[in-house]
């Protein structure tokens, strides 16, 4: 059973920084893409950033230049470095890990339980 455990959330003032971590267990070393999503209260969950198995990255426009995603494959861990935080970044942040499915070409996405990030003005 694959499990993702996040850490690093908390309360920070606007302009501050936080680093989120997420470690996968039970997956071996077959993780493909990893990513971070967030859900702002009253809104749909949205993509924040992804990192592929080849370290290719994508970012939401709202976080480009402020957030950096990275991964440590040896530790099955993905990080989200968040700088210049704004009150509108306040949300529950979820990590994801995509693993191969038994059907060729199909991936199974696993989700963490979420970690709260609150940015005060």
Image: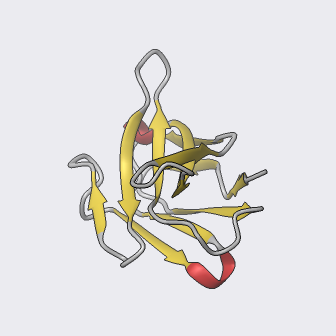
Point out residue 3 in the picture as x, y percentages from the top left corner: 74, 52
Position above or below: 52 against 84: below
Seen as rendered, the residue at the extreme bottom is: 74
Q: Quadrant of residue 67?
A: bottom left
Position above or below: 99 against 43: below
Residue at screen point 54% across, 67% down: 79
Point out residue 35 in the picture as x, y percentages from the top left corner: 46, 55
Point out residue 107 in the picture as x, y percentages from the top left corner: 47, 50
Instruction: Answer with left or right where residue 117 lies relative to residue 53.
Output: right
Residue at screen point 60% across, 46% down: 110
Position above or below: 6 against 30: above
Using the image as rendered, state which of residue 63 and residue 10 is in the foreground.
63
Using the image as rendered, state which of residue 69 and residue 116 is in the foreground.
69
Instruction: Answer with left or right where residue 100 lies relative to residue 63.
Output: right
Q: Quadrant of residue 111?
A: top right
Q: What colour scheme does the image use? A: secondary structure
Q: Is residue 121 visible?
A: no
Q: Quadrant of the C terminus?
A: top left
Position above or below: 85 against 68: above
Point out residue 17 in the picture as x, y percentages from the top left corner: 50, 62
Q: Is residue 6 visible?
A: yes
Residue at screen point 32% across, 62% down: 66
Seen as rendered, the residue at the extreme left is: 61
Using the image as rendered, state which of residue 84 and residue 47 is in the foreground.
47
Instruction: Answer with left or right where residue 23 lies relative to residue 60.
Output: right
């Amino acid at each position: 059973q694959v499990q993702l455990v996040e850490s690093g959330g908390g309360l920070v003032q606007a302009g501050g920084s936080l680093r989120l971590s997420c470690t996968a267990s039970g997956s071996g070393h077959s993780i493909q893409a990893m990513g971070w999503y967030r859900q702002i209260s009253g809104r749909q969950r949205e993509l924040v950033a992804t990192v592929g198995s080849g370290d290719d990255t994508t970012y939401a426009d709202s976080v480009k230049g402020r957030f950096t995603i990275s991964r440590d494959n040896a530790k099955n861990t993905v990080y989200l470095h968040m700088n210049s935080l704004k009150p509108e970044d306040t949300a529950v942040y979820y990590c994801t890990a995509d693993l191969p499915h038994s059907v060729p070409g199909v991936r199974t996405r696993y989700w963490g339980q979420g970690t709260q990030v609150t940015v005060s003005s």
